[in-house]
Amino acid sequence: MKIGNTAIKATGLAASIFWFILLPEYQTVSIVIFMLLSLIPIFICCLFTIVFTVFPFFWFLEDSLDKKQIFKIYFPYYAILVFSISSFSIHIFNYQLFAIAFFTSAFFTLLQTWVWNSKLDTHEKI
Amino acid sequence: MKQLVNIIAAIGFSTLFYKQGLGLNLVLFSLLTVPVLYINKKEAFFKTNSIIKSLSYLITSVAVFLYQSDLAIIANLLSFFILVGTVSEYKASIYINWLNGCYTTIAAFFHRYSENIQSNTIEDSSKKRKIDYWYWIKIIGIPTIVIILFIGLYRNGNPMFNDLISKIDFSFINLYWILFSVLGYYLFSNITHPIAIEPLTSSDLSTGNSLIKARNSSEEQLESEKQLGVVLMSLLNILITLFLITDVLYVIQTNITAASQFSNIVHSGVNALIASILLAIIIILYFFRGDLNFYKKNKTLKRLTYVWIILNSLLVITISIKNYQYITSFGLTYKRIGLNVYLLLTLIGLSTTLIKVLNIKNLWYLLRVNTQMSFILLIASSTFNWDKTITHYNLNYAERTDTNYLISLSDNNTMLLKASVNSHLFSKIQQQAIYKKYADYVKKLEENSWQEYVYDNIFLK
């Protein structure tokens, strides 16, 4: 399984969503530096979250199920759980824009990571 | 056509909810959602189940407009998920509907996207391909972000370019409003393509409510289990009878005047009730989990079980009498109403357990019926203005009233408090507090936008 490749794609998606939400608030040129620098922590966050919460499903279950089946069976509960955690966290942080941007990007990126993984399986089979 | 409906619905969503509180917008949203669901899945709405769920959703949204209570908001959210889940699979149990509704609302887009990818890769590439959303996001999103970045950089490098860009006025575009509309589109795109979680839904559909007799049960084992059941049930029946007699005698003989003493009696009774009911249901479920239901000599055990359930119901009734006395003396509070709701749910639970034993039903039957009843009770509870009911009862019927408690309730009782402000029950300080509460509430109502209108806004004008 291509962890690095998935983590890089996830970083791109997460950073896009994150800054798309934050940009209207910070319309200065200096923000470009922060955008570029933010790629490092975003990459680390993506890598750890994916390795610890998404890949284990595929690592531990691939002997008994194919990836499409893993997606079909486990993705719904994962999505509901991540949504609950994200919404709760946004509420805890009093709906601050930074929290909304962070957890929204985390939510959509994690769901998309599942899709990428289920896609990999089909290519591998073909 | 369906895409257009979703786009219009998304714009409607932003108009209703962007930077707004809840009120009239929730009623309008539900009036928008039900037709959108109908347009996209007409066949689901020909079933009574879906019509009932739609009605309950509409009722809760009207309840939010009327009272804006937390209970009504929770009931509305729950009934929304259940309605969406019912549209995805109307035959499923209510808790499965809720899960399906949650999943559809949250992530149906990703589910469909994954399925599209799978089918696109499996199908011959020469065949007609479905829309690759990720491709379009890449084609539009990434260049847009890069262009914005470079415009920002070039503006610093060239004053003329900076002037030119400065003249372009996009201030009329609210990016957050657009993002909110995208969120609305995502929501409607999800709910218009309801998805059932598999294999959970299929498993639920294939599981009936009745127990099926196993072929390999031995008579000896059933007999010994029955004997154990008879002994245990007999002892438990004696025990609960003794408890009930002493409980009734204690209440009759003791003269209770202090609220704290009454509170202790009610709450200790409730604790006993919780333990007793849980134990009763666990024991009944254990003995009637399998072939003992079909055993010819199980009549004594069944009769003892019915007595045990009836005695537990009597326990519920004694507790509710004590709670009623408590309310008559010291007035209504949310906790006392909550206790009544709990007692009602307990009675329902005991009744369904009785039906389970009587008609040889399985555990799923209990889960299905009890969750359905809880949902009905939640919808019914959300239609009451509890704050106003509590205030009205305590001011007019309770022997002693905690007026500070009434003032601390939500704005739903403000008008009633204002009308009763000259009552002898309120001190001067409390009257001032009521006037302040009223002034704050009126100010809040006046500041409401049309989306946030509530029932009290009608009377304000």
Image (cartoon, helix red, strand yellow):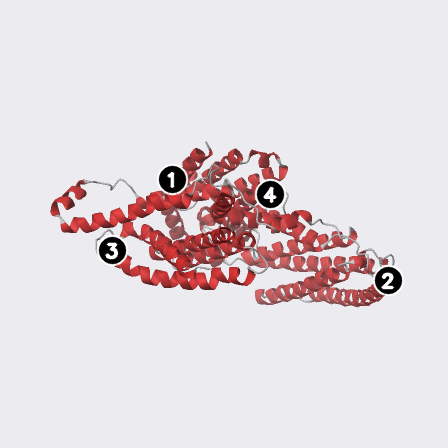
Distance Cα–Cα, label 2 vs label 1: 69 Å
**Image quadrant in which you'd find residue B291:** bottom right
**For mark 3, what is the residue?**
A32
Q: Secondary structure at mark 3?
A: helix
Residues packed near mark 2 inside 10 Å, few (<14), some (14 to 19) or many (20 plus) = few
Q: Examine the rendered structure and indicate whether residue A98 appears above or below residue B247.
A: above
Chain letter, disc 2 residue: B
In the rendering, at what x and y percent does residue B189 appear?
46, 41
Which image quadrant: the N terminus of chain B?
top left
Q: What's the residue type where badge 2 is placed? A: Glu
**For mark 1, what is the residue?**
B15
Distance Cα–Cα, label 3 vs label 2: 79 Å
* Residue B277 in the figure: left or right of residue B335: right
Q: Is residue B180 visible?
A: no
Badge nearest the viewer, 1 or 4: 4
Q: Examine the rendered structure and indicate whether residue B424 appears above or below residue B187.
A: below
Distance Cα–Cα, label 4 vs label 2: 42 Å
Of residues B271 and B119, the one nearer the viewer is B119
Q: Earlier in the sequence, mark 4 or mark 2?
A: 4
**For mark 4, what is the residue?**
B89
